Image: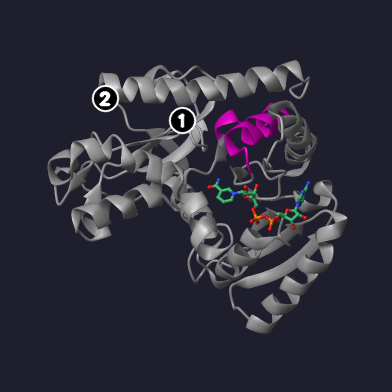
Amino acid sequence: THAPITVTLTGAGGQIGYAALFRIAAGDLFGPDQPVSLRLLEIPQGMRAAEGAALELADCAFPTLAGVDITDDANVAFDGTNVALLIGSRPRTAGMERGDLLAANGAIFGPQGSAINAHADDDVRVVVVGNPANTNALIAQQHAPDVPAERFTALTRLDHNRAVGLLAAEAGAPVADIAGVTIWGNHSATQYPDLSHATVRGDAALAAVDPAWARGAYIERVAQRGAEIIEVRGGSSVASAANAAIEHTRDWVLGTGPRAAGRWTSAAIVSRGEYGVPEGLISSFPVTSSDGAWSIVDGLEIDEFSRERIDASVAELSAERDAVRELGLMP
Ligand code: NAI
């Protein structure tokens, strides 16, 4: 039997935490033979909810669950951790200024980055879910100089999965027949779901669906899908977000596996200047994973329409980074 892998969830008493915990404890991250030990980090107001979830975890008697610890101390939560899912954040609320948003998140993700730097295992992998996810990941990374920069990522897998699902529906094809979809840029309304390299059953997606739809209503629908869920469900995307966080982490650690040409996923990872994205930004790219590391799919041709869309979203990331620097939230 394997030694347990330690997984820390922040915001574990919240909605996505509640949806993610049971699947992780059941073995959905690393399979049925790999025990996991859970660390739940909450703020004092969220501790009771996390404790309640832990009682239910005990009542599931999952054989893969090696233990659950609950704390409001980041130094304890990240001690020896292998995987950190940073879910708790201060998302934007109506009328909130960008400076206030970033300052509130700097106060969360700066100290968490420092605690990861000081206490996490050498192999730690960080997945930021809490919004604004890309910039929160950057703040945490900048506070963890001893951790390789590429270990800090942000979740755009939910956007990716939405983009795949909506394309499959439009094309009247099963999801398994879709490949080559990419989310570029920021996990925000400026994100660019790109179908220019996508295929449906091996044929160009832009031949299977109306290209005007692909470059118009589709982009809007993917970017606004979260709002659509709130409108229809009366609550935000929770189970799908937890699912995406699990898929991102699993693919990162276990690899995306042997795939047919054009099969990739999307994740926000640190740029080394690929596709004209300024170095150091944590931006969404087409990626595969092997040996525990993401690689950006290279050599894709970027047409003028895509260039403009990617540049616009990346400009937003640059502006967020500048604002974070001006606010003194980066060391
Ligand atoms: P929620 O409000 O139900 O839960 C958030 C939890 O985080 C609360 O229990 C709160 O007490 C806790 N928390 C706040 N500050 C914390 C800190 N410093 N340390 C530890 N815990 C802390 O929210 P929900 O629905 O679970 O969403 C969480 C985040 O995920 C939000 O920022 C949301 O915008 C984001 N999100 C991101 C998605 C993505 O694709 N990247 C998709 C959906 C949501």
Residue 292: x and y, percent? 47, 44
Q: Is mark 2 on a helix, strand or loop?
A: loop
Question: From mark 1 to mark 2, how far is it between C-alphas?
Answer: 17 Å
| On-image quarter of the N terminus | bottom right
* Discs 1, 2 touching: Cβ within 8 Å: no
State yes or no: residue 147 in magenta: yes
Q: Residue 140: which numbered mark, if any?
A: none
Mark found first going from the N terminus, 1 or 2: 1
Q: Which residue position is annotated with label 2? A: 299
Q: Which residue is drawn at 47% across and 26% down?
A: 313
Q: 178 or 85, which lies in front?
A: 178
Residue 78: x and y, percent? 75, 49
Q: 235 or 19, which lies in front?
A: 235
Instruction: Identify the image quadrant of residue 101.
Output: top right
Q: Residue at x 46, y 45 (%)?
A: 224
Q: Is mark 1 on a helix, strand or loop?
A: loop
Question: Crowding near pointer 2: few (<14 within 10 Å), some, many (20+)?
Answer: few
Residue 7: x and y, percent? 65, 56
> In the displayed structure, would residue 103 be above or below residue 208?
above
Q: Please say whether residue 288 is visible from this viewpoint.
A: no
For badge 2, the amino acid type reads Gly
Instruction: Identify the image quadrant of residue 261.
Output: top left
Residue range in magenta is 131-150
Question: Crowding near pointer 1: few (<14 within 10 Å), some, many (20+)?
Answer: many
Q: Which residue position is annotated with label 1? A: 185
For badge 1, the amino acid type reads Gly
310 vs 175, left or right, is: right
84 vs 306, left or right, is: right
> In the displayed structure, would residue 204 be above or below residue 172?
above
Front label number (1 vs 2): 1
